[in-house]
Image (tube, rainbow, N blue to C red):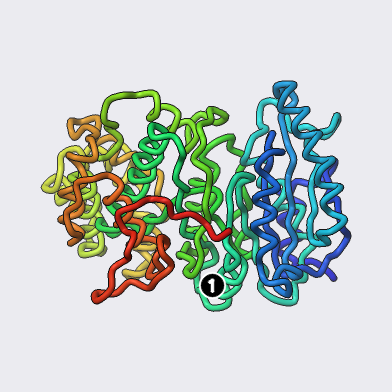
Amino acid sequence: MALPVAVQRYLEKRGLRSPWRIEGNARCDYQGAVIIPALAESDSLFATLDSLQTSPAALLDQFFIVVVVNHRQDAAASDKQDNYRTLRKLAEAAVDRPNLSWIDAASEGLELPSKTGGVGLARKLGFDLALERLDWTGARILATLDADTLVRADYLPALSKHFATSAAGGAVVPFCHPAASDKTEQGAIVAYELYLRAHVLGLQLAGSPYAFHTVGSTMSCRALDYVRAGGMNRRQAGEDFYFLQQLAKTSGVSGVAGTVVYPSARISCRTPFGTGRSVAQLAADPHPARLYYDPRCYGVLGGWLQLVTQYWHSEARELLARAAAISAVLEDFLVTEGLQDVWPGLCRNHGGAEGRLNALHGWFDGLKTTRLIHRLTAAGWHRQTATEALPPLFQWAGLPAAEDPEKQLNLLRRLQIGTACAFCKTRLSRKSRCCRVEVSPCLPDR
């Protein structure tokens, strides 16, 4: 079956192909693909694959699983040996799993470049090669996990149901870190996930269109919207943030309901930042973590977004003057970022409110949002502990007070994961409360 013209053009201009190829099967009629980059993951990968196998058989047959076994040319010898072991195990496992495929980016001559290799390039390799294996008679789905992430049996059904009706081309699946057996590591996991959820809550309260989690193992999109977004970037860390930001600009990002993924929060220093490194740093620090942004930062952000929504028809100098009334730091930031130069062009190209505001959010994107918060932090609203930051944030959101970090995390999990209680699988309502809301396991179905 011929590829859509847009897909052909993308692969010609930006796609990754030779010398890599998909191994394991030759089918070209799949409705979706799940891409899993794997670097020295022979111990955890097959638990991830086993969890995917719990999906309904009919739906599992419509998706193919692509494991991108990869390392850079300068990788440690131990990582290379682990990857070779993974490739052997995949070939053995494929005998009983007809939808299991893999890409060898680890053998001699196939390794990723030392300068650009990393998780972004590995994800891109899997996505790009998968495009040629899809049945393009309908809207097709691309999703990605990590090789240490577990899913529930409802993972693929939830993705299929979501993209059958969603107007947005990108999506994020709710996540929950399983509890650790070590008390110190568990405290670090709670602190880090609580920080992630509190930040998204602050963005939501501010009215930001970029108020979603950017966790690599939660990402999915329609295949055509992947192409329209320019494909996956090649970043060695933060690839999830930039990919979802681009999807938000080109087709939108929404939340998947009805399932949860369970990424590992193990200690790791593979990437310059991210969950593993953050948990390692938190576990090593005996003092309360000053992770959390001062809630006033979100107030300034919300004030700016409300201002531009109300005064979308105004000139740049008026917007800057009104921004100064909110915060002098905000005004200085907007000047530094060039609002006075950008705004006239947005006004010329977009005469109506909706088009102009969409264009503004394309310029004032997730990265600029983060930069503004960092500027406010550097100017004096320093990062805070959970005890300092969360009570006013919860009060702003109309949430009940909770002083214990695990109770705070459980509350935000319930709020952000949805109506399905992740702790005892019951439905939450005003008349019923989760019988285990004060504990933290939130473990996947086994």
Q: Left or right? Give the position of 72 relative to 401.
A: right
Image coords of residue 1 (percent x, y) = 85, 71
Image coords of residue 358 (percent x, y) = 39, 63
Query: Would you place residue 374 above or below residue 362 in this image?
Result: above
Q: Left or right? Give the position of 342 relative to 314.
A: right
Q: Left or right? Give the position of 344 relative to 83.
A: left
Q: Left or right? Give the position of 162 relative to 15.
A: left
Name the one closer to the observer, 68 or 357. Answer: 68
Query: Would you place residue 178 above or below residue 189 in this image?
Result: below
**Which amino acid, by three-letter code, is at mark 1?**
His
Q: Residue at x 22, y 53 (%)?
A: 304
Image coords of residue 209 (percent x, y) = 37, 59
Name the one closer to the observer, 364 or 83. Answer: 83
Name the one closer to the observer, 320 or 444. Answer: 444
The answer to whether residue 226 is seen in the rendering is yes
Determine which quarter of the picture holds residue 229: bottom right
Q: Residue at x 61, y 51 (%)?
A: 145
Determine which quarter of the picture holds residue 290: top left
Name the residue beneath numbered marker 1.
Answer: 162
Query: Would you place residue 178 above or below residue 433 in this image?
Result: above
Question: How many numbered callouts?
Answer: 1
Circle 1 sits in a helix, a strand or a loop, which is it?
helix
